Amino acid sequence: MRVALGRLAAVGWRVRLPRPRWFRAAVAAAACAVAAFLFGVGVGGVAAAGPGVRQVRSVPVASRTIALTFDDGPDPTYTPAILAELERYGAKATFFVIGQELVRYPAIGRAEAEAGMEIGNHGFHHLVLAGLDPTAIRSEAQPVEREITSITGNRPTLYRLPRGRASGRALRALADLGYTTVNWSIDTRDWTGRSAQAIAAQVLAEAEPGAIVLLHDGGGNRQATVQALGIVLPALQARGYRFVTVSQLLELGQPQGATA
């Protein structure tokens, strides 16, 4: 039963629920409420962690503004191609980097920063933080923090949870390190081998002001993601959308899915 409820809790962003959007949101909220009541588990297996912990899924904004995020890089093949697409359309994005990959490819991290992209923390070894104690979490987060700071000159304040999962204790530890955890409102599932057309169709169907989109620039073949950007960027710009970093999005409004 616990496994079934855990799957139910994740349904709001792992499974495309039927439209309209209010129906998807209502079902997801109800599922999370049931799981949280029984097990203290929130969306994506993230437990409530108490005051001072800040989690973000989307940001209500007045303007047509959206944040694209890319996980698991930097990658020598796909990150430069994604940067080229973003620069082609004057778009900004946030890259949540894995520390061991940033150590391998620091020049690509510098290219991200020089292009005006934001770089966030995705852990040094891409470990799921649930079950780790605060000391282990610091060991996972802080080496990446140092690498990003050395490249950008700015300490990162955003953390993307591998697989979107953490315990309440882990979230508390990240908050104590000064991090906001950034989830997403649109999961493209681009890591599953979907076509560029399927990825793009989902983003175009679910895009709304303040959305945070989950994509990947590393961890496998991301050519479909690159190609999808060539569809998504001009199509949403034609609708009046502007692409910004997560931090820029946060400056524009009040985040949803956050605890203060």
Image (cartoon, rainbow, N blue to C red):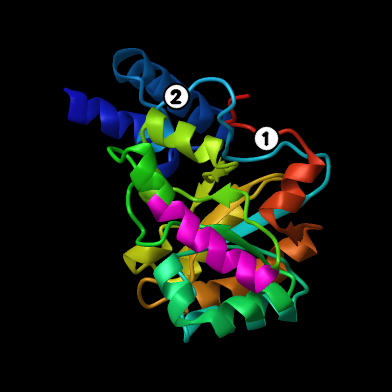
Q: In screen coordinates, is 193 left or right of 247?
A: left
The secondary structure that most of the magenta stretch takes on is helix
Q: Judge the density around disc 1: few (<14), some (14-19), many (≥20) Cα neighbours within 10 Å.
A: some
Q: In screen coordinates, is 167 left or right of 88?
A: left
**x%, y% of residue 103?**
46, 76
| Quadrant of res 148 | bottom right
Which one is in front, 185 or 152? 152
Give the quadrant of the N terminus: top left
Residue at numbered disc 1: 255
Residue 149 located within the stretch drawn in magenta: yes
Instruction: Report whether residue 201 is seen.
Output: no
Assign a secondary structure to mark 1. loop
Could you tell me which residue is drawn at 40 percent across and 28 percent down?
Answer: 168
Q: Amino acid at mark 2?
A: Ala
Where residue 79 is drawn, which disc sits there? none
Q: How many badges with numbers are in the image?
A: 2
**x%, y% of residue 212?**
60, 49
| Quadrant of res 230 | bottom right
Structural distance between the alpha carbons of marks 1 and 2: 16 Å
**Is residue 76 positioned above or below 25 on the image?**
below
Could you tell me which residue is drawn at 59 percent across and 33 percent down?
Answer: 54
Where residue 48 is drawn, which disc sits there? 2
Magenta-highlighted residues? 139-152
Could you tell me which residue is drawn at 59 percent across and 49 percent down?
Answer: 158
Instruction: Report whether residue 199 is seen.
Output: yes
Assign a secondary structure to mark 2. loop
Which one is in front, 255 or 13? 255
**Is residue 139 positioned above or below 86 on the image?**
above
**x%, y% of residue 174?**
49, 40
Q: Amino acid at mark 1?
A: Pro
CB under 8 Å between discs 1 and 2: no
